[in-house]
Image (cartoon, grey):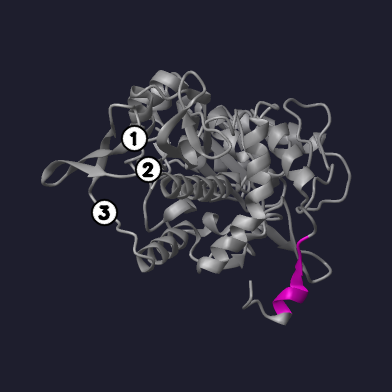
Amino acid sequence: IPDLSDAEKLQMEVGTYTADQFYDDLMRVTDYRTDSDLADILIRESQPTMRWMRQKGVRFVPLWGRQAFKLEDGKFHFWGGLVLEPIGAGVGLIDALIDISEAEGVEVRYETMAAQLVQDERGRIVGVRAKTKAGYENIPAKAVVLACGGFEANSEMRARYLGPNWDLVKVRGTQYNTGEGIQMALDIGAQPCGHWSGCHAVAWDLNAPPYGDRKITDLFQKHSYPFGIIVNLDGQRFVDEGADIRNYTYAKYGREILRQPKMTAVQIFDAKVTHLLRDEYRIREVTKATANTIEELGERLGIDREGLATTVREFNAAVQPGSFNPTIKDGKRTVGIHPPKANWALPIDTPPFVGHAVTCGITFTFGGLRINTRGQVLDTMDQPIAGLYAAGELVGGLFFDNYPGGTGLTAGAVFGRLAGGSAGEDVKRSA
């Protein structure tokens, strides 16, 4: 970050995050199912890819508000291995990449939906058949890179692969990630790979629209739950809010909310911790209530009054002494209740109390296509399909059940660069 001031540098404590730590975290949260070859590429190429993007013109800033807390030493302590984001977050990243691509002569087509891969008589990919406003058109290409996401916006595929009620969840992003890219490849014999019944799903505002809002972007998410408790409409806790730092639990807790009555949960905080809540809790478009008693808070949010009061009373009694530190797993826990809270356990006892109502919001799906270490799509006989490459969320084999925060964007960048580079090399070689 060349434009970081000396004063800002002195305020930052980023710690270390080694390749071994990255590998251990990735494997741990996916129950050691991640393809080791893909994991090795992802980790080895993550920093070189970031530097390459910066060289190309993508600018980054520290994640001051989301991944750091200012402690007694006056410094912002970053945690979870996440330090940077692109300027403008996701929207800014896309804007930057499009501007850079167009400056280098890349043609970008809008309202053009790829519908089918075109092959020659030898089976090589020689283009795509696309649907445009004017009708269908064959677009010739010497190589094709599929980088068009998973099937999270396809309610039929969600129900078919993820299971009951997944067709009812809110979609965090675009309504157009409906799985056509995966299906086009499967139709010509590509090999399916990964966790087809798994996905990234988070706590998402209860009254958010069915699909992502490009003005609000990701601010409907609610990720500060480690500093409070999460209850269902019966007033019962159902997860360990402090099992791990947010980076390693948020992508799987959406599934747990889906299993609750009316697919609804409420995150509850007291006045001791509200200053720690992320910026997303302060937007206008939020479903919340504030009250001076727990019983009143329950009534305002439709939670069983007595059930909630009992849960909070038992939780408070179970909290053990210890030092609270939001930047590490501090071991401040509960004893004698189920589920336990393993870290950051503080009594809910200081009014005003605030509750945020959330539901399940799906981010992306984990099932996709098998690729090799060059980004080539493999067929069902483990042979590369000539001229076909893949990157991003439709690559299977990386994530199972869960994922470490930030790894999805990192994987998109790393394997996008890999697939594009390999496609370019192969086209030059065949010329």
Residue of label 2 = 143
Q: What residue type is labelled 3?
A: Arg
Residue 386, given in percent of the width and then of the height, sits at 41, 33
Q: What element carries label 1?
A: strand
Q: Is mark 3 on a helix, strand or loop?
A: loop
| CA distance for labels 2 and 3 | 17 Å
Front one among 289 and 410? 410
Q: What residue type is labelled 2?
A: Ala
Residue depicted at 57% across the width and 28% down the height: 256
Q: Is residue 12 magenta?
A: yes
| CA distance for labels 3 and 1 | 20 Å
Q: Does label 3 or label 1 sit earlier along the sequence? A: 3
Front one among 302 and 139? 139
Estimate how packed mark 1 is, as few (under 14), some (14 to 19) or many (20 or more) residues with alpha carbons within 10 Å.
many
Q: Is residue 372 magenta?
A: no
Residue of label 1 = 125
Q: Quadrant of residue 183?
A: top left
Mark 1–mark 2 CB contact (< 8 Å): yes
| CA distance for labels 1 and 2 | 7 Å
Q: Does label 1 or label 2 sit earlier along the sequence? A: 1
Q: Does label 2 or label 3 sit earlier along the sequence? A: 3
Residue 379, given in percent of the width and then of the height, sits at 45, 23
Residue of label 3 = 109
Residue depicted at 49% across the width and 36% down the height: 376
Q: In which quarter of the image is the N terminus?
A: bottom right
Mark 2–mark 3 CB contact (< 8 Å): no
Q: What stretch is highlighted in magenta?
A: 7-14
Residue depicted at 44% across the width and 20% down the height: 161
Q: Given this view, does label 3 or label 1 mark the residue nearer the observer?
A: 1
Q: In this view, does 213 lie to the left or right of 18?
A: left
